Image: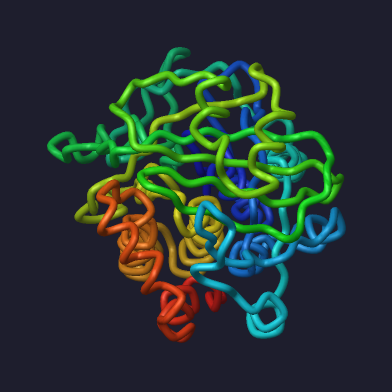
Amino acid sequence: MKVIIVGGGIGGLATAVAFHRRGRQVEVLERAAAFTEVGAGLTIQPNGLRALDAVGLGERLRAGGLAEPPAGIRGRRGDWLVRNDAEDLKRRFGAWVTVHRAALVDLLRAAVPPEALRPGIDVRHVHPDGTVHHSEGTSTADLVVGADGVHSVTRRSLWPDHPGPRYVGYTTWRFLAPPQPVEGSAETWGSGERFGYVRMPDGRVYCYAMANAPAGSRIGLDELRGRFAGWHDPIPALLGSAREEAVLQHDTYELPALPAYVRGNVAVLGDAAHAMTPNLGQGACQALEDAVTLARAVDTLGVRPGLAAYDSARRPRTQRIARRSRQAGAAAHWTSTPLTTLRDAVLPLLPYALFDRSLTPAYTWTI
């Protein structure tokens, strides 16, 4: 069996590793000139680590250093709105790991035969029969997997009438701050904006910020510092230590629900299938789950029955998590003073079990 994978990011390379470990011939077509990742930090949650365990890479990632589960949500003055029990989360669900996105891509890439990696290939159309038209001609396979991101060519080829990704109303900045003391990891909510940070194993601090803005807005570091100047420590210091060239800004998109994740001999996964807001930190984890689930289903059942089983297993789960992710961050982007005041007063009074129920289905996945 030959498997062509369109896209060489985390989901695409994880798919290549999963099929290669099962003895299948793989070929990864990547538009960029090299298999790498431009980005900052990434937290792999327990379910994502179990997916990496399925392809023999989980322990190697854990060996790089474990991370603390999220401590919770704060108000801009530093008061806790939601406080997690980090030790209880680790006991119940397992480890968290924070890693540079490029390091995870390198780990996955090294587990794929070099001859299977084809950078600099621009895929232009994918047919349900497994034919792929690209910048160097035409390729065919028993199975094609579209792991080509939120603006997926594979998805547009198979579902041309689907509306495609939609802007959710806020833009996101990410950067790595130099090593400095921070306690745990937390996210802070304001009025239409928020800031989060997570310590990396090497002492650097992965930071992200989100703010309501029109699509296409470009806001520099000086303005970003001004937005968060009055927020609690260590947020101003983290922004003060950032370098302009190290700050990445991307508008935030999500994908309206697809009617299926498979058509003919083609499947989509990761952001190509279910791009979601980053509010639960589950985007990469769900792509990893997709990859190992797809490989096992096809290897066990054959292409068409395996694709049907993959769609049945993955579409309800990922679309449910995408909805919960959208809901989880909605209140952070309220701009009405009465609403944000009410939010900050009510959240600390709510039972923790209410928040726990929204997290448990994501963390408890097993293949």
Note whether 111 is above or below 67 in the view shown: above
The image quadrant of residue 357 is: bottom left
- Quadrant containing the C terminus in the rendered view: bottom right
Is 327 placed left or right of 350 in the picture? left
Q: Position of residue 80 (x, y in %)?
A: 55, 67
**Looking at the image, which residue is at 83% across and 49% down?**
181
**Looking at the image, which residue is at 60% across and 21% down?**
119
Q: Position of residue 136 (x, y in %)?
A: 47, 13
Examine the rendering and report whether any part of residue 267 can be seen.
no
Is 351 placed left or right of 341 in the picture? right
Note whether 210 is above or below 37 in the view shown: below
**Looking at the image, which residue is at 17% across and 34% down?**
160
Q: Nearer the viewer, residue 212 or 34?
A: 212
Q: Position of residue 339 (x, y in %)?
A: 26, 59
The residue positioned farthest toward the left in the image shown = 161
Q: Nearer the viewer, residue 14 or 296?
A: 14
Is 219 placed left or right of 98 in the picture? left
Which colour scheme appears in the figure?
Answer: rainbow
Note whether 149 is above or below 54 in the view shown: above
The residue positioned farthest toward the top in the image shown = 136
Q: Position of residue 33 (x, y in %)?
A: 61, 16
The image quadrant of residue 92 is: bottom right
